[in-house]
Amino acid sequence: MEDRDALEEETYDAYDGRDAIIFLIDASVPMFKRPPVDDIDAAQTENDCPFVLAIKCAYNTLCSKIFTDPNDSVAIVLFGTKKTAPNDKYGVYTNTFLLQDLKNPDCEPITQLDDMLNKDGGMDEYMYAESNPQSISLADSLWLCSSIFSKHKSKTDKKQIFLFTNNDEPHSKFSAKQKQAERRIGDLQDGGVSIFLFPIGEEFNTTKVYQVGILFLFYLIVTVTMLNHVFIAMSHQELLESNDKGGILPGSMTTDELLLKICRKCQKKRTFASLVFNLDSNTKFGVRLYNLIRPAAQPKRVPLDKRTNEPVKSVTTKFNAETAETLLPSELIKYTTVCDEKIRLDKNDLASLKSKFPSGFTLLGFKPIGKLKLHLHLSPASFIYPDEDLVKGSRMIFGALMHRCKARGFAPLCVLKMTAAMKPRIVALLPHEEHDPNQAPLFGFHVIILPFRNDVRKFNYNELVESTTVLNDERKFVQQIWKADPNQIDAAKAVVKKLTSKVGYTPSDYLDPALRTKWNTLEGMALGRENIESVEDLVMPDIDAIDNRLGQRSTTFNDLVFPLGYQSQYVPSASKAKDPKNEAAVEEAAKNGWVDKMTVDVLKGYLSNQGIKGVAKMKKAECVEKIKLHLNLK
Amino acid sequence: MSYSKNSNWSQPGTSHRPNSKAIKPKNGYVLIADIGSPTSRILHRDRTYAQQIKECLIAFIQQKIFINNAIDDVAVILSGSDKTQNSLDYKNIQVLKNMEKVSWETAKLVNETVQTKNCEGDWMDALGVALDLIHRKVKAGNVYSSIQIIFFTAFESPFKTSERTQKAYISALLAEHTSLFIVGSNINQEILENEEKMSKGELTACQLIREANGGIYSFGDFSADVVNCTEQPKIGSPFNVTLDIGSKIQIPISAYIKTKKSDSLKWSEEISTGEALVDKERTYQKEQSNAIIDKQDVLTAFKYGSRIIPITVEDEKQWSYKSGNKCLSVLAFVDPIPPQFGSGTGTRFIFSHRKSGVVDRNSQIALSALINAMAETGKVALVRYVYANNCRMALGVLSPRIKFKYECLVFHELPFADDWRQYEFPPIITPKSQPSHEQMEAIDQLIDKLDLTNDEAFDSTKMSDPYEEYVRHVIGFKVLNPEDPLPEIPPHIKMYLQPSPSLMEGAKDVLERIRQLFPLQTTGKLKINDFEASKREAIPATAEEMEREIQNKKSRLDVGGDVDLGFILGMNSVDKVGTTNPVKDFSLLLQSGKKSVEEIYDEMSKVILELLEDSGGTNAPLMVKAKNCIEAYREHSVAEGRVAYFNRWMKQFKEQVISNYFTDFWQKYLTESLGLITKDECPSSDVDKHQAETFLRLPKQQQVNEIDSVDEDEELLNLID
């Protein structure tokens, strides 16, 4: 049992490639019922029926996948519909409608869903769901899913079904249809398909609390008898807890939350490296290394032939600067110049320097977490998790090591060389056990890269901080830095307290406005939208709100720390130089022939305001020339 | 610089510390090497005193080339040279290199010239020449922030001095703020305390140092100080902005980079056969026909599904996100953010605004109030960070940092939603897989044994980047030995990346227990993993895998048609250390990398025993062979820093020698240079000279025991008694 568990989980872990996802959406009558309005605030924002919610999820998934994973495939299947569309490829299935076939995300499917969601009556076509629930068969729709997967060209894709429903009991227990459904699920499982259930839960949240159990019962029957493969996207406990809080949270199943969960499921768990962890030369176990925080990829650029709009490829050729002969890679050698001496090394030799250091983790010892210099951040952390595929038994020793380190507040200190191309580094491993049900489970070690001496700048703090020499108790002269007095600190504390946010920082709260603007604009252009939605910049402080909140406190603080009439010696130079007011002055000066008396900053500011390029590198004389040229004074 | 350690009466005076305010302060060094006839004396490892000096000189020059932008001046003077070449015309004193900007030329000259000469030089004369050099340089208008004379001598050659000369020297030293360092003499702590034991030369030198400035160092301490060729970067120019809280509170600040990945050396390409530069050109071609398209006709576009959206630079500028003016504005105060959320590539420390060296006192007070308020409430600030107008915008966090010498805010970047991957990692310890009590206990013991709480070792911020050090080592080696193969990683660099041997020795039992308690089995994946994919995979752990890897490499070589015949031949002919030509086999195997070093070592030790057994303790040629084997084994261990392994084997070997009655061999052939590896030879050893000497002695008792066992029948012996 234990082995099987581990095995299954590992196969899930080991995945590295493309996804094929079918959105299997319940389109029976209950899915079109709008949630009852208990809360007026919620009603305004969240009054979508479960079906719309599910379609929104599919739409959002497509919209982001087209940028992040353009090679994934997505299909949308509705079941419980009256409408059936005979399909040459897959045949006819009762009460099942193939809204979109499995293919890479593209404009048409996105437009189709967009129309459904935003056009009046866009949904009508699908509204006429089958009124007789008895004739609906989950098995049939699952069957369609398996034919879709079996006809899919790319066989290596990771196959997933996202099942959206608010019906906790599609078929009565022990009915024939239930059995059929179980069989289908079994078949899908054998075909390596994972099924995720996204229960949409307004009903559960508001009135029928106990139905949570029933919903679970239904799926548990399936789960227990047939497979471990239906991952319940929301855990039982999680659902119950959100109800326990009593606040009848429409929020527990809002679009945002559902989207977040989908987003989490769609992220591809890519192993960055599989490495050996050496406790000593005799004891080694396997770990997988993941990068949880890395800059998001920007939309890709492709070069294009302007005349034909055909994509072109870019080719870099190397040639001898003297003879203009084209060079082969084997004719090249690497060199560096140190103190006027050229050192030449064969490319392979140069690469071999790094591979002389063994890769993997080597344990050096244990340090209390408090003693680590974690404030000296160097680069984003990585994460490790045991790898049974590399060394059997890794889980147990990794688990014990992590557990004891966590309990005792110690961090293993290691040498780590991640890949052949990376140099060895000293890292600290921070044990992490995440029990918060609202977060993705996270058990393992964070790998924090510690800086070497040459990565840390040498500061002479005496020059950065003003201090006075005072006589201390032991009659010795010591440097004492200038500090704020308790009154000033209290004034600052009032500011800090007033602006303290109740919710802590989580990355998912902050979308990158630059990236999102790019996405939105490209999407708008591709789909020919007239209005491109602007992105809300969540990383822009709301100055008015802050001022209001602080009220008198900011004045009190300023009065206490800054003397009357305090003028900062800091002047934002660039903005002054670029001030358009200077323009007239510069132009006049130029006409009167004393432009060279003005400062370089002002001249440069003027030129860049005029849209002239390469200003940064110009010397003063060049600037003057350029200005004269620009104003046709020559 | 100071040569630290056992120089407790030297005065590493503050006067010759580089003045940080001066622009590009350069230092002056005069190296004096005694290469007179006494320097042919052999130190350990068959190296002469002169060779030792040469190594130190080259290491020193190399360090100066790599640090401080190579602006320091270095002069080299040889004392006891067969040439006389100096402005004062002192005999047998040769100015090899005048005091000039350090260069490889100097290192090469030293490499070619420094060796024992059959002459003797007066070291006081040499010192006189050095002082004269310095005097001329300073007179010529050179400004040094420090000047050092580093004298390598054991005071074994005769010299002349007088009180007048000494006084003149001392005043010369003091006049130019020059310090004098003596390296490699016999002077140690014991002698220092007892002047009667000093030779006349040593006494004179000590007097000079006492009057002026300086210190006395052993070769080992000196090398340890000059071996690092990377330096800690200096403070850069700050990012000046106001820290804004709403529109009312604005504190002018300067943010300085505290950590950032150091720059590696830049490597460019050129043509292997000549010196010609390489030009690169990017052309655009049609996908199918490879027809070249004019650059003017190429436009960038974005892909959206199957649709392609052409975009001009102007358009993109128009619609892309505008981050606004440069700023550092507080969004809110929140609870501290765990370290794993740090994104970005470094850390900035934020101090109050400083302009032309003057700190804004008021802003320091304002910042101090904020720092202390944040520390007392236990909060950090989330901020919007824009480095320059309309540049990339980042989300960041400011955390308070209060020390005795300074207070500042520490700035880190934080990830956006799109930069964060919320993969799921299910619990590792589940009711089904629960480590046993013993297993947990063993891990606890391991933590106790390898506790570095009070250990300064492995504070990474005090260590040089080992890879960067190695690259510089290789460059230095290549300049002096262009034809030789690349050197291995020297032991002082390896030391950084290995657990401390003494700590591991202490944890030996626990580690053994862990090995028994946790069954671990390497799977096929680790073994089979082909090398292609394993660019990111684990290194082969066993010889078997290593072999497979080499097979892989070989097959790739075959495909490429570019086969290094010698490489393969060499490998095919030797697969094991044999008794016929063990030393050669040993070195070939090590070069081929076919097997792990430990395995080769084990084979070697087997062969040594085999040879001894064959010799029966009497056959001299076989015993010599065995001795040569030990020599080779030991030499490699010292060079590779595998001290613990060798010493462990040596102890085992001694036992075997005793129990197998090879004591004759031991006494005849094992000299000081073949026993345990000592600290002096390799810093990672924990054996000192004394211990090594006692180890070599076979205790009398043991010899008696041995006789006992020779007779085997103890009772019989007793009867005879």
Image (cartoon, coloured by chain):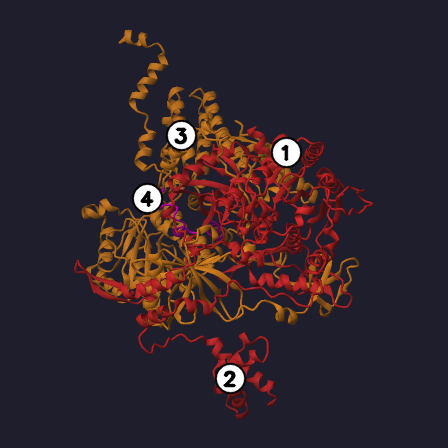
Chain colours: A red, B orange
Q: CA distance from mark 1 to mark 2?
A: 74 Å
What amino acid type should be assigned to the residue bearing mark 1?
Val
Subunit that carries the residue with mark 3: B
Type of residue at label 2?
Lys
Amino acid at pointer 3: Met
* Numbered disc 3: secondary structure: helix
Circles 1, 4 touching at the beta carbon (< 8 Å)? no
Disc on the earlier residue, 1 or 2: 1
Of residues B343 and A165, the one nearer the viewer is A165
Q: Are marks 1 and 4 on the same chain?
A: no
Distance from the alpha carbon under mark 2 to that under mark 4: 62 Å
Numbered tag placed on residue A581 in the rendering: 2
Please identify, in this view, whether the residue under mark 3 or under mark 2 is nearer the observer.
2
The magenta stretch spans which residues?
B452-472
Report helix, strand or loop for mark 1. Answer: helix
Q: Output the chain of dot 1.
A: A
> Does the stretch in magenta take in A616?
no
| Chain letter for mark 2 | A
Position of the N terminus of chain A by quadrant: top right
From the image, tell me which residue sits under label 1.
A222
Which residue is found at the position 47% from the left and 36% from the top? A399
Q: Is residue B471 magenta?
A: yes
Circle 4 residue: B454
Of discs 1 and 2, which sits in the foreground?
Answer: 1
Residue at the image point whose x is 50% and y is 80% from the top: A579
Residue indicated by mark 3: B650
Cα separation between marks 3 and 2: 84 Å
